[in-house]
Image: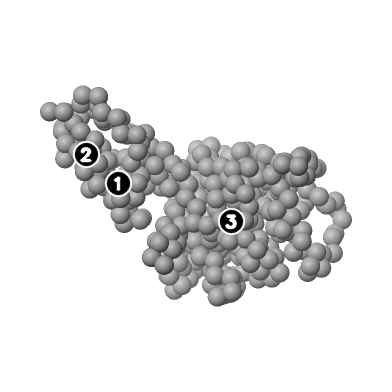
Amino acid sequence: MQITKEQVLQALGHVEEPDLKKDLVTLNMIQDIDIQGNRVSFSVILTTPACPLKAMIENACRNAILHFISKEADIHINMTSRVTSQKNTGVPGVKNIIAVASGKGGVGKSTVAVNLALGLAKTGAKVGLIDADIYGPSIPIMFGLENARPKAGQVDGKTRIEPIEKYGVKLLSIGFFTDPNQPVPWRGPMVSTAVKQLFNDADWGELDYLIVDLPPGTGDIHITITQTFPVTGAVIVTTPQNVALADARKGIGMFMMDAINVPILGIVENMSYFTPAELPENKYYIFGQGGGKQLAAQLQVPFLGEIPLVKSISDSGDAGKPIVMDDGGIMAGAFIEMAKKVAQQIAISNAKAAATQSVA
């Protein structure tokens, strides 16, 4: 029996993309079908290289061919990806802008932003990171780039800042342009201008995700960025204490305001529990338990995971080599899982936006 392309498409029409709730053929995710006798090969185009359901989708495709066409089929599947984008971000070449925010300081927002960026890059995505925390830039220290100074280059006749690349992520921070030992007293308008320059005056090239580490709270910088650039979504960082959760709620409320209207991709609970190195199975909930999960449930936003309170996380940031770079480590794994969930929520958010636009 000669296998046909129509049969392959019909069989794969039974495979549903679990997040988008439609079959792969309708979503135009099946391409490059090639049939040689009983050898069937095709590509599955995922919405992100960080897709946490990659293995499950591949397995479902294989089973569909075996079940609906032939148990003798020799199946070769190329799992690839094309990161989706719902709108023009206002930054040439950048598909998605992701804000990482917290209601208050001291909850590890920069640590989450840095390891999120590196986690996405490790899955094969093209990633940039802007340190928009003008008052307390920490990215230069966390990447071991305290004395780095970006170069300027000519692009299409205009002078552009060239982001510094390290560990596969393109970086820009106000800390690259100021003396780390000198405080810079910023006034409101100066802050807005400086932040916009990090987006507009840089040559970011092609990026799937541009992560923005915002300052704590809800102030000028948040309003400037969200009203100047169409932000794909925001990740909110909190700790389990009630005071942090109350501030996180305010931060989420700001993004949900009509004038800002940025989708919440989810909540990350940092410093969730303490696990001693000598007792890796034990979890001690020093600051309370389950607060981030409850807040996510109350506000009906995704919960992106618990990050433990482990000294190696802060030590690695201080040493200029973030914890995600620790290949095979438990903590690196926790951040990579979080990064995959964020990528998943971006794909879902983009699909919803596209559906809304097509209906309108």
- CB under 8 Å between callouts 1 and 2? no
Q: Earlier in the sequence, mark 1 or mark 3?
A: 1
Residue 25's tag is 1
Q: Position of residue 117 (x, y in %)?
A: 58, 48
Left or right, residue 57 beside residue 202: left
Q: Nearer the viewer, residue 276 or 151?
A: 151
Instruction: Please state which amino acid type lies under the numbered disc 2.
Output: Glu
- Residue 163 placement (x, y as % from top left): 70, 43
Element at label 3: loop
Disc 3 residue crowd, few under 14, some 14–19, many 20+, Cα 10 Å: some
Residue 15 seen: yes
Q: Residue at x 46, y 43 (%)?
A: 82
Of the two numbered discs 3 and 2 in the rendering, the one whose residue sits closer to the viewer: 2
Q: Position of residue 346 (x, y in %)?
A: 48, 55
Identify the residue at image location x=54%, y=70%.
Answer: 261
Q: Residue at x 76, y 53 (%)?
A: 174
**Which residue is denoted by mark 2 in the rendering?**
6
Q: Which residue is mark 3?
A: 89
Three-letter amino acid code at disc 1?
Answer: Val
Q: Secondary structure at mark 1?
A: loop
Farthest residue, direction left: 1
